[in-house]
Image (cartoon, helix red, strand yellow):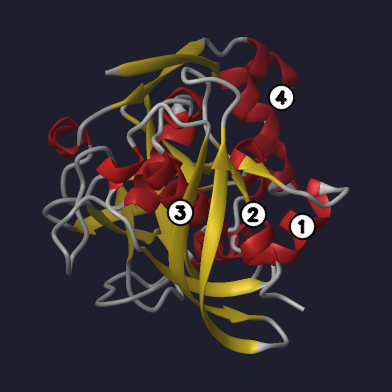
Amino acid sequence: MYIKKFSLVIIAIICLSLSVEDIVSASTISSLVDYDIEVLHWKDVNKIIPRYAKFTVIDVESGKSFNVQRRAGTHHADVQPLTQKDTKIMKDIYGGKWSWRRRAILIMANNRLLAASMHGMPHGAGALDNGFPGHFCIHFIGSVTHKSERSDLAHNVMILKAGGKVDEFMKDLNPVMLTNVFMVTVKNADKGLSSKLAITNEKKLNSSLKKLGRIEAIQWNVLIPGDETSTNKLIVQVPVEVKMVVEGEGAIHSTINYTLIRTSPISPWKINIDPLVSLID
């Protein structure tokens, strides 16, 4: 179990932006105690939030929060927003458009704060009068998806981000795994995480990352096995087949070659993102 100290005072402050009726008094905020963020395995979380349990979801990036109820789910939590107001807040978190993109979240349940990841796409059945057409999924360490019954890397990266462990995770990645994780950050439109892994030959990394923000959907396949890059090299080429949909351009299908570099055999790898950026006009 990973634990990171996190003050509930901070959570209360960032949630003030929701609406006037959500504001709590300064005296109440100052009396709140510190909580630990826990990165727990699904088998333990399953006991903390059993079916029909109600709890609060806090979006790490925006600080916005909403209430949900777990309705089902065997290997992860299938949940629904409690009310139409909760549905609106969730949709606002996703910029007003439902999305499969994963986001780092914290779960407040039974006076515990748990690291998790959610997507924002209604699907399947729904039972609450909340204006939400179905349910969405919340994953924890050890969760698997409905179809693949495998752990989802995109969710796992967001869980580690929520738990304050993503930097530690990324610094030890081999070139193939780092390439996959970078592509996950692009898929999730997480510019902050992308910037931790990326380098460019252009003058401004931020401009290149902004260009990648136009990618609406992306799939990829790394074309070499992971053990082929387990060497003491300082420069490695990683070919990747990419299929993506770009705003204003439509579908793009290409094979690109990423260059990954490090300054010493014990230094973390960085990925030159220019081949992907060059596909976007």
Which numbered marker is on residue 273? 2
Cα distance, mark 4 to mark 3?
54 Å
Q: Where does residue 167 sit, x and y in percent of width and height? A: 51, 27
- Front one among 67 and 10: 10
The disc at residue 259 is none
Question: Does label 2 or label 1 sit earlier along the sequence?
Answer: 1
Identify which amino acid the numbered label 3 is placed on. Answer: Val
Image marks 2 and 1: residues in contact by CB distance under 8 Å: yes
Q: How many marks?
A: 4
Task: In the rendered structure, find residue 25 and report the number of the disc placed on it.
Answer: 4
- In depth, the one of 21 and 126 nearer the eye is 126
Q: Amino acid at mark 2?
A: Ile
Specify the farthest residue to the right: 203
Q: Earlier in the sequence, mark 3 or mark 2?
A: 3
Relative to 30, is 62 above or below? below
In primary-sequence order, the first of circles 3 and 1 is 1
Residue depth check, mark 4 versus mark 1: number of the one nearer the observer:
1
Q: Which residue is mark 1?
A: 208
Q: How much space separates mark 2 and mark 1, taking CA atoms?
A: 8 Å
Instruction: Report, in whole angstroms, how far the alpha carbon at label 3 lies from the one at label 2.
Output: 12 Å
Can residue 58 be seen from the camera position used here? yes
Instruction: Look at the picture and state if 218 lies above or below 46.
Output: below
Inter-mark Cα distance, 3 to 1: 20 Å
Left or right: 211 as drawn, with respect to 77 = right
